[in-house]
Image: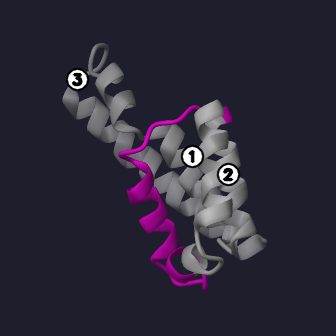
Amino acid sequence: MVIGIGIGAAMHGYVPENFFEQYLGGGQWWTVPLAVIVAVPMYANAAGIVPVIQVFVAKGVPLGTAIAFMMATVGLSIPEATLLKKVMTVKLIGIYFGVVTVFIILSGFVFNMLL
């Protein structure tokens, strides 16, 4: 959690104001899938990613895109796949990642439309 707070503080203080809005804002259709793809190699627990998401929203990223990034960071990380490999087959992990990815992206689009 402390690492997440540190990353959020660094992003809040040192990243230019329109950096995230330029790439993840503006309502383009590709922002939610991009946020999900960028989140997969990261690993954070739910509490540690909250300060990062707060900075995203404060810097102009739509709430649905930020929520999709948060869910993908927690639910679709590469370390999670490694842990799941101990109890699931590769095919089942692929199905899990595919279904979860689709519904995270759909959730991001819905939140962006509603909020």
Residue 9 — which label?
Answer: 2
Tell me where residue 34 appears, x and y as whole percent. 43, 67
Within 10 Å of disc 3 (Cα), the crowding (few <14, some 14-19, many 20+) is: few
Rendering coords of residue 48 (x, y %):
63, 36
Camera-nearest label, 1 or 2: 2
Indicate the secondary structure of the residue bearing disc 2: helix
Residue furthest to the left in view is 90
Q: Which amino acid does label 2 sit on?
A: Ala
Secondary structure found at label 1: helix
- Residue tagged 1: 71
Quadrant containing the N terminus in the rendered view: top right
The residue sitting at 37% across, 42% down in the picture is 97
Q: Position of residue 72 (x, y in %)?
A: 49, 47
The amino acid at mark 1 is Met
Using the rendered view, name the quadrant where residue 91 is placed: top left
Q: In which quarter of the image is the C terminus?
A: bottom right
Q: Earlier in the sequence, mark 1 or mark 2?
A: 2
Which mark lies nearer to you, 3 or 2? 2
Magenta-highlighted residues:
22-47
First in sequence: mark 3 vs mark 2: 2
Q: In this view, does 34 lie to the left or right of 45?
A: left
Residue at 54%, 74% in the rendered image: 24
Instruction: Name the residue type under label 3.
Output: Thr
How crowded pointer 1 is (Cα within 10 Å; few <14, some 14-19, many 20+) is rated as many
Is label 3 in a helix, a strand or a loop? loop
Question: CA gap, disc 1 to disc 3?
Answer: 23 Å
Q: Do the residues labelled 1 and 2 touch (CB within 8 Å)?
A: no
Q: Where is residue 69 in the image (x, y as percent from the top left)?
A: 54, 55
Residue 28 lies in the magenta stretch: yes
Determine which residue is flagged by label 3: 89
Spatial separation of the CA atoms under disc 3 and disc 2: 39 Å
Which residue: 52% across, 53% down?
103
